[in-house]
Image: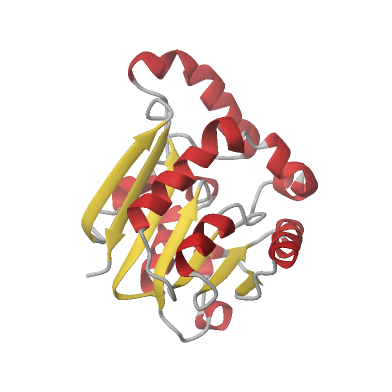
Amino acid sequence: MRRPTPYTLSARLYDVISFEWPIYGAGREAAFELLNLPAGSHVLDLGCGTGLNFAGLQRMIGPTGSITGIDASSQMLEQARRRADQAGWDNVTLVAADATALTTADVGETEFDAALSTYALSLMTPWQAALDAMIAATRVGGVVAVVDMQRPVGRAAIWTPLAKLACRLGGADIEAHPWAAMPERLDTITESAVRGGHIQVRVGRIR
């Protein structure tokens, strides 16, 4: 996974310019609700960026759990480390790696209880390899969550030009629909859609 240049240049400002509060935070919260992880869970956060998932994950897993964040941008990981340090989360490990070519050298031998990717797979080529890496790193019976974007639907379709522009500026492919590949790879798919269907959430269980 090679993040587009904007993610490197704007890492320090990313949380401000990413429309997190009005739009994209809702997708994260929907994923946390579907995941409903028990305390002590070990989670892989693929394409973790500045660590915007960390607080929600920490609410579930507590100090006995752990988060391993993967991102290709060292600048984004710097912000994620600052977030973890300021919050006192000493159970966060950050790794600079290409999510489409993960190895055990990147994530270790331990299988995760859950893997999560929010708004990241649509940035990657090929995203299928990153999804497969998430699944491979998760134990049997564990869960995999994907949050990503598509064109708004229904009455919200009026916002499609703005959604397409936001994705283009961020380097994401709004037509990627990575969640569509989950049913053939995972069992017991649960789903949610927020913000006029622009944000799609899927959680599946490892067979």
Q: Is residue 112 left or right of residue 97?
A: left
Q: Image point 36% across, 14% down: which residue?
A: 155
91 to the left or right of 146: right
How far across and down, in percent of the image, does residue 119 sit? 51, 46
Give the left or right position of residue 23, taking residue 96 as reference: left
Look at the picture and state if 90 lies above or below 153.
Answer: below
Which quadrant is the C terminus positioned in?
bottom left
Residue at the limit of the structure toward the bottom, as seen here: 109
Q: Nearer the viewer, residue 53 or 176?
A: 53
Residue at 45% in and 63% down: 60
The quarter holding residue 51 reads bottom right
Question: Height in image: 174 above or below 156?
Answer: below
Image quarter of the N terminus: bottom right
Compared to 207, does 79 lie above or below? above
Here the colouring is: secondary structure
Left or right of residue 52, residue 161 in this image: left
The image position of residue 15, as x and y in percent, is 69, 43
Q: How many marks?
A: 0
Q: Position of residue 92 (x, y in %)?
A: 62, 72
Question: Residue 106's image quarter?
Answer: bottom right
**Residue 139 drawn at (x, y percent):** 33, 77
Asked whether residue 126 is in view, the answer is no
Q: Is residue 170 visible?
A: yes
**Residue depicted at 37% across the width and 51% down the height:** 33
Q: Please name the residue shown 74% across and 67% down the image.
A: 85
